[in-house]
Amino acid sequence: MIITTNDIIFVSKYVFMKTYKKSKPDTTQLYEPVAAYKLSGTTSVTDSGLQVVHDARAGIKFKKLLNLGEIMALSLSDLARILNLSLRTIQRYDTDFVLDADASSKIIQLSILQDKGLEVFGDQSAFNDWLRMPMRELDGGSPLEFLDTPFGYQILHQVLGRIEHGIFA
């Protein structure tokens, strides 16, 4: 399902991708973004961006975070830093513990980034290596260091987009 606006295409598999401007925009239709995210090897595609909000508010089980962390080769310490929690707190969680809306939204963001990285690199281990590689574009930091804020995810999506289109900084 592809839905277009003047400057952006929303695709169920992508967060967003910029396209070329059209000379005459179609103003006769209403457009709504579609969000997608992948947790523990299964892809859930929603019918609207609002569903992502509902899913985050309902909470995601800690087991899903552990599965995603395993796929991305993230340690418990890495996951704790991403969620802005202490390592000891995260160690106490049972696998069936349902995380709050803030932590759940971060898991969804991480999952979307993982999908984009896998698409760009074509290989999970290559993407995992990229996450740990210091980059001049990130002031010598690794992408992993930027996963603790929403702005960090935006920056990493931009970097992945440039890599995808062959634009290296």
Image (cartoon, rainbow, N blue to C red):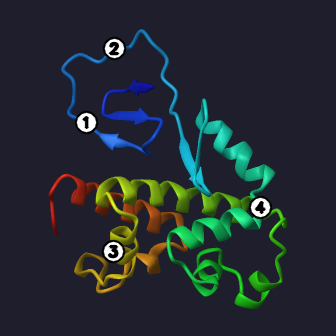
Identify the mark nearer the N-term, 3 or 2. 2
User: Label 3 belongs to which residue?
Assistant: 130
Q: Quadrant of residue 1?
A: top left
Give, as a three-letter code, the residue at label 2.
Asp
Q: Which residue: 25% across, 75% down?
A: 137
Return the x and y of residue 44 as percentages of the image width and height.
61, 42
Give, as a three-letter code, the residue at label 4.
Lys
Helix, strand or loop under label 4: loop
Return the x and y of residue 76 as percentages of the image width and height.
64, 83
Helix, strand or loop under label 1: loop
User: Label 2 belongs to which residue?
Assistant: 26
CB contact under 8 Å: marks 4 and 2: no
Give, as a three-letter code, the residue at label 1.
Thr
3D distance between C-alphas at marks 4 and 3: 27 Å
User: Label 1 belongs to which residue?
Assistant: 19
> Above or below — where is 162 with respect to 17?
below
Q: Which residue: 61% across, 63% down?
A: 106
User: Label 4 belongs to which residue?
Assistant: 61
Identify the mark nearer the N-term, 1 or 2. 1
Helix, strand or loop under label 2: loop
Q: Quadrant of residue 126?
A: bottom left
Give, as a three-letter code, the residue at label 3.
Trp
> Above or below — where is 53 with respect to 103?
above
